[in-house]
Image: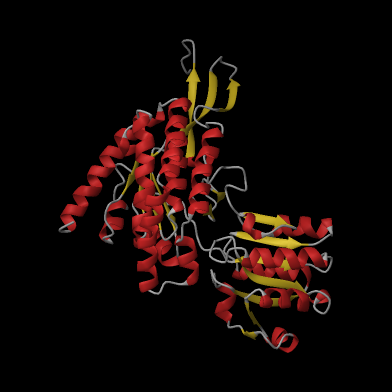
Amino acid sequence: MNNENDIKNLLLDMGEKAKSASKILALATTGTKNAALISAASSIRASVPAIIAANCQDMDIAKDKRLTGAMIDRLFLDQERIEAIAASIEDIAKLEDPIGNILGEKTRPNGLKISRIRVPLGVIGIIFESRPNVTADAGVLCLKSGNASILRCGSESENSSSAIHRCLTKGLVEAGLPEACIQLIPTQDRSAVGELLKLSEYVDIIVPRGGKSLIERVQNDSRIPVMAHLDGVCHVYIDSDADLEKAVNISLNAKMRRTGICGSAETLLVDEKVVTTHLPIILDTLYDGGCEIRGDQKILNLYPRAVKASEEDWFTEYLDAIISVKIVDGVQGAIDHIAKYGSNHTDCIITENKATAEKFLSEVDSAIVIHNASTQYADGGEFGMGAEIGISTGKMHARGPVGLEQLTSYKYQVRGNGQTRP
């Protein structure tokens, strides 16, 4: 792009095409949408060498820029991860089509029949950073839910995302749908984001998925409603009635399975009653697994290999092999800590006491609250959604994993027989 005017015209053209495509897609049959998905999955499998070659370009650039290990992990694609992308698309094709579902019906005393029907949102703009799989997840979830999409990937994943997008486009063409159903902005100029956020005439909702600075910019600058996906300061709380084996295994998995995803545990809270019986074993397991331990003075006195935590640590989404650890006064202490420092994303309690578990599940105000399982299950695929655009931490419209149903709205259809209002 030569100048800002070129980028403005590019985004206006993309917006117009997306709006037109959304009208066609809203009326497309389930069979047509599924055919596009199956074809896209097949194209991704046939394009593994090309996608890996594109990803190698991105990885070389990422290493030159000295990106964090977490960002490089999120960026990396191999044959196994590419197969997971294709399989996820096929899973979405198998899911029930939400469009046209009747959410409620009633007949009024005057004979009016009122139905509430699920419909697409329209055009969705999705801005994301280093994970190229989001190109597929976002594009196909929007497609299956009847929405056109305009995608803006981060510069880190430009080559990988473009290679995946070509496969999605091939699926659309083979199914007879407009290529503009899924568009990828073809420039990394930062002004493109600003122009996308102005397209209120064409775009119905913006979904940002990335770091705090990206989310803040979108929320501050957008003229379009925003479905926020904030950072994941996720907690694991070890209760006094926790089973030790579960506590050890879940804590390790929640932190170290993949440290760079939003469902990775960032803070470990431990009831003071099990500090001597549970905490040393858990910390040894994490430390031996390569995790840095940060804690307050109580933790430092108990565990010399820990380093001192600052106040900022309790607010921090590390996305790395680091965990902050704090001793609390029972479940209420854990709930209070999460209320002060958490990000309303995902929090977990490990306990065999059902009453304590129910208190935690009821009183922790997060999008996902878990009992006796890893926070890494905070994922649309694990929720049976096939995939997700992200985890919504807000309370308006959608909360938790954003899948097909969360990308829809509804309208009322009213059927009468000549009624007039007195």
Residue 322 at least partly seen: yes
Taking the image as shown, residue 227 lies to the left or right of residue 253, namely left
Residue sitting at x 45%, y 36%: 37
Image colouring: secondary structure
- Which of 232 and 250 lies nearest the eye of the viewer? 250
Q: Residue shown at 77%/79% (left/top)?
A: 280
Q: Percent from the top left, x then y, of residue 56?
A: 39, 61
The quadrant of the rendering that contains the N terminus is bottom left
In percent of width and height, residue 399 lies at 56, 50
Q: Is residue 140 above or below residue 274?
A: above
Residue in the picture at 46% in, 57% down = 77
Name the outermost residue toward the front: 49
Viewer-proximal residue among 274 and 361: 274
Toward which corner of the image does residue 57 lie, by quadrant?
A: bottom left
Instruction: Kindly tell me whether residue 224 is visible in this rendering.
Output: no
Q: Residue at the spot x=37%, y=67% of the render?
A: 60
Location of residue 378 by image quarter: bottom right
Q: Name the image quarter holding residue 44.
A: top left
Residue 275 position, x and y percent, is 80, 78
Q: Position of residue 370 (x, y in %)?
A: 70, 56
